[in-house]
Structures are given as C-alpha cells and as structure tokens.
C-alpha cells in the first residue's frame, strides 16, 4: 500500500492517521511532470501529509498558469521527495522562464503573492518552511520542508 491514510490508533480520525506521502505526490506525474521519491514509505501524520501535498498542488498550478518552456510550450516540472532524518523535503522545479528580477518584490509590495503566501502559510502552520528561488531564464524552484514530529 503506497498511499492513503492509515489510522494507527484505531480511532478513525484521518487527521491523526499515518499516511505515506508518496501516494499523495505520485499521482501528479504526467507527461510534463516527473516525480521521484524514495522506494520506502514516507510516513507522516495525515494532516501534515495532506497539507504538504496541497502545497505541491498549488506550486504545480502556478507552473501551469504562468510558466512556458522553450518554444512557448507548457513548462515541464519535476517533483523530488526526500526523506531526511529530521525532516521531509519536497522540491518542485520547472523549466519556465523564471520570474523577472524585481517582480517578486513588486508583487509582494502590491499584495499579489497569493499562491506563494498560501504555500508559506501552510508550511508555517506545520512548523516548516517554503523557499522560492527563481532565476530569469532558468525556471523556478519551490522547496518545502516539514519537520518530523
């Protein structure tokens, strides 16, 4: 079983159930989105796994809406799941044009950081972090980190 929530206590509360994050992220894989993760389960509390998967979904929605790859095609994206000793790290990267210099600062000043703020807010509530790195001409990378609890 590589996905879904399992209730380890028998209480039936899905938020407390243990969930293999791989099962929530691997369905994002398509012809334009590649997924890579460990061969062993990445177990997290169901609520944490669900919020992390929702943040990945928001990052991918942003790629679909804003990023175009070479020749104007829809950008490719890559999801990498890493199970580290003290934390779980998910990176979403695309091959779009990147965000022009100064645009992030302008968007933040104008209150137009909806998706980025949503992702950061989700991760902060979990005790984690979200970092956005974008280089014009080289795509954008969102790194999501949540601690193991």
Image (cartoon, grey):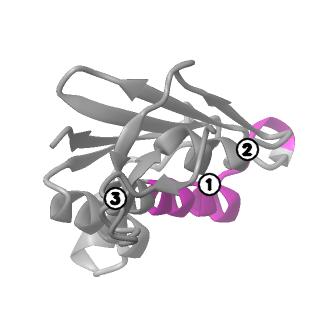
- Mark nearer the N terminus (3 vs 1): 1
* Residue that sits furthest to the bottom in the current view: 111
Q: Which residue is mark 3?
A: 104
- Residue 106: give x, y in percent of width and height: 30, 67
Closer to the camera in the image, 58 or 72:
58
Dot 2 falls on a residue whose secondary structure is: loop
What residue is rendered at 46% in x and 53% in y? 6
Say which quarter of the image contains residue 147.
top left
What residue is rendered at 80% in x and 49% in y? 74
**Are there few (<14), some (14-19), or many (20+) residues within 10 Å of tag 2?**
many
- Residue 97: give x, y in percent of width and height: 61, 42
Q: How many marks?
A: 3
Q: Which residue is mark 2?
A: 75
Q: Which residue is mark 1?
A: 63
**3 vs 1, front mark:** 1
**Are there few (<14), some (14-19), or many (20+) residues within 10 Å of tag 1?**
many
* Residue that sits furthest to the front in the current view: 10
Assign the N terminus to one quadrant of the image: top right
Assign the C terminus to one quadrant of the image: top left
Say which quarter of the image contains residue 69.
top right
């Amino acid at each position: 079983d590589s996905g879904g929530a399992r209730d380890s206590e028998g209480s039936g509360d899905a938020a407390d159930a243990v969930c293999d994050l791989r099962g929530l992220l691997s369905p994002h894989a398509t012809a334009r989105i590649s997924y890579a993760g460990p061969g062993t389960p990445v177990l997290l509390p169901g609520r944490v796994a669900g919020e992390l998967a929702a943040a990945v979904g928001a990052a991918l929605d942003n790629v679909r809406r804003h990023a175009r790859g070479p020749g104007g095609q829809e950008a490719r994206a890559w999801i990498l799941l890493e199970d580290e000793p003290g934390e779980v790290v998910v990176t979403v990267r695309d091959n779009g044009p990147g965000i022009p210099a100064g645009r992030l600062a302008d968007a933040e000043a104008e209150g137009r950081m909806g998706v980025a703020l949503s992702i950061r807010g989700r991760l902060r509530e979990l005790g984690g972090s979200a970092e956005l790195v974008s280089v014009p001409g080289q795509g954008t990378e969102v790194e999501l980190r949540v601690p193991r609890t």
